[in-house]
Image (spheres, rainbow, N blue to C red):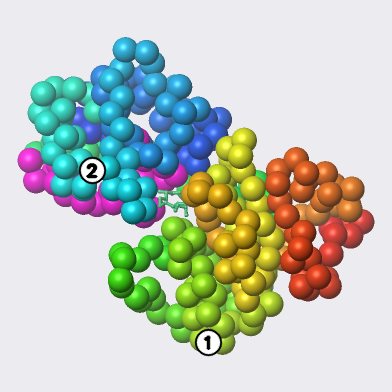
């Protein structure tokens, strides 16, 4: 690449990945080093922010469900002001900026003012969750479709999704922002015909030291979410691909549970018998 990676007056929407700074792209790191100001989400953790050089201004503009610290329009205004003042602006977002990151609204607002906006992709939570569970999101012949869906609902509203389409036994469903709506997701998918024993995995704080994974099944998902999770972000994976997680030995799974907090624990009696760890995995 020739020339500077970013220019004064330009805004880069940068994917920070799921939290582990090693999962930042090289390009994201270069952009952080070149920036003069970084606006970041609440989901961008301290490990990633440590990669922002001292002296570069960091502005938290975090939104966590129910705790909107700044509304979207205020964020757009801040980005525009900084760009128009000639800053090299990085807007750092958790995961990939193009997935449930409200990037389109920011791009539209900035473009309307003639401010150039560019995107640096990041590793999305679903990819990182699958990686840390040692599974593939797609499976030849078994999971031919991968759907990213948000289960976020505004207070008092119904979760309005096309449940018939989502209840596809040959798909992997990656549910973002699904903690509150987990009981609805479980019930509606089962009502639409997806089997209650469809494997599910809940991963909280993916890629961070506090990561916890909880293997369960669709009908028990609400219980898993209610009893197992803290207040970190959590991603839910549903589908046959979850069942095919790589496991090599009983010793390994027990060790893995201790090390990572993955719990088959009190729900294990409900597991499909062939989800048991075996010598061959
Ligand atoms: N752009 C982000 C998603 C933003 S929506 C991405 O590509 O990952 C926020 C939701 O993403 C959270 O509610 C959670 O469902 C998921 N998420 C983001 N980071 C996560 C993490 N470290 N662990 C688990 N889930 C995460």
Quickly name the residue at label 1: 191
Quickly name the residue at label 2: 70
Q: Please name which of the two marks, 2 or 1, marks the residue nearer to the observer.
A: 2
- Determine whether 27 is above or below 103 in the image: above
x, y percentage for residue 186? 54, 75
- Determine whether 243 is above or below 55 in the image: below
Report the span colored magenta.
Answer: 91-113
112 is within the stretch colored magenta? yes
User: Crowding near pointer 2: few (<14 within 10 Å), some, many (20+)?
Assistant: few
Quadrant location, the C terminus: bottom right
Tell me the residue at 31%/25% (across/down).
58
Q: Is residue 202 left or right of residue 147?
A: right
Tell me the residue at 51%/68% (across/down).
182
Q: Is residue 117 visible?
A: yes
120 is within the stretch colored magenta? no
x, y percentage for residue 141? 66, 72
The quarter of the picture where residue 93 lies is top left
Q: Which mark is residue 165?
A: none
Task: Say whether mark 1 is within 8 Å of ligand 1.
Answer: no
Cα distance between the residues tagged 2 and 1: 38 Å
Tell me the residue at 45%/80% (across/down).
163
User: Crowding near pointer 1: few (<14 within 10 Å), some, many (20+)?
Assistant: some
Quadrant location, the N terminus: top left
The quarter of the picture where residue 222 lies is bottom right
x, y percentage for residue 14? 35, 36
Q: Is residue 184 left or right of residue 280?
A: left
- Determine whether 87 is above or below 14 in the image: above
Q: Is residue 236 left or right of residue 258?
A: left
Tell me the residue at 57%/62% (across/down).
226
């Amino acid at each position: 690449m020739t020339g500077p990676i970013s220019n004064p007056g330009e805004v880069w929407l940068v994917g920070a990945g799921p939290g582990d700074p090693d999962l930042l792209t090289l390009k994201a790191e270069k952009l952080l080093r070149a920036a003069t100001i970084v606006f970041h989400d609440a989901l961008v953790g301290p490990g990633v922010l440590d990669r922002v050089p001292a002296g570069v201004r960091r502005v938290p503009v975090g939104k966590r469900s129910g705790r909107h610290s700044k509304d979207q329009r205020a964020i757009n205004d801040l980005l525009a002001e900084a760009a128009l003042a000639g800053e090299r602006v990085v807007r750092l977002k958790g995961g990939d900026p193009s997935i449930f990151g409200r990037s389109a609204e920011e791009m539209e607002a900035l473009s309307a003012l003639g401010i150039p906006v560019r995107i640096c992709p990041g590793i999305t939570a679903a990819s990182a969750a699958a990686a840390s569970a040692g599974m593939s999101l797609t499976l030849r012949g078994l999971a031919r479709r991968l759907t990213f869906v948000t289960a976020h609902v505004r207070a008092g509203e119904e979760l309005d999704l096309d449940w018939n389409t989502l209840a596809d036994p040959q798909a992997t469903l990656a549910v973002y922002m699904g903690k509150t709506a987990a009981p609805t997701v479980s019930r509606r998918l089962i009502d639409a015909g997806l089997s209650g024993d469809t494997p599910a995995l809940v991963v909280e704080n993916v890629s961070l030291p506090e990561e916890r994974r909880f293997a369960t099944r669709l009908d028990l998902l609400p219980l898993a979410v209610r009893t197992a999770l803290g207040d970190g972000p959590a991603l839910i994976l549903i589908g046959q691909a979850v069942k095919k997680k790589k496991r090599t030995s009983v010793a390994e799974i027990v060790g893995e549970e201790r090390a990572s907090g993955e719990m088959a624990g009190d729900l294990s009696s409900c597991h499909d018998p062939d989800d048991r760890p075996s010598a061959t995995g």
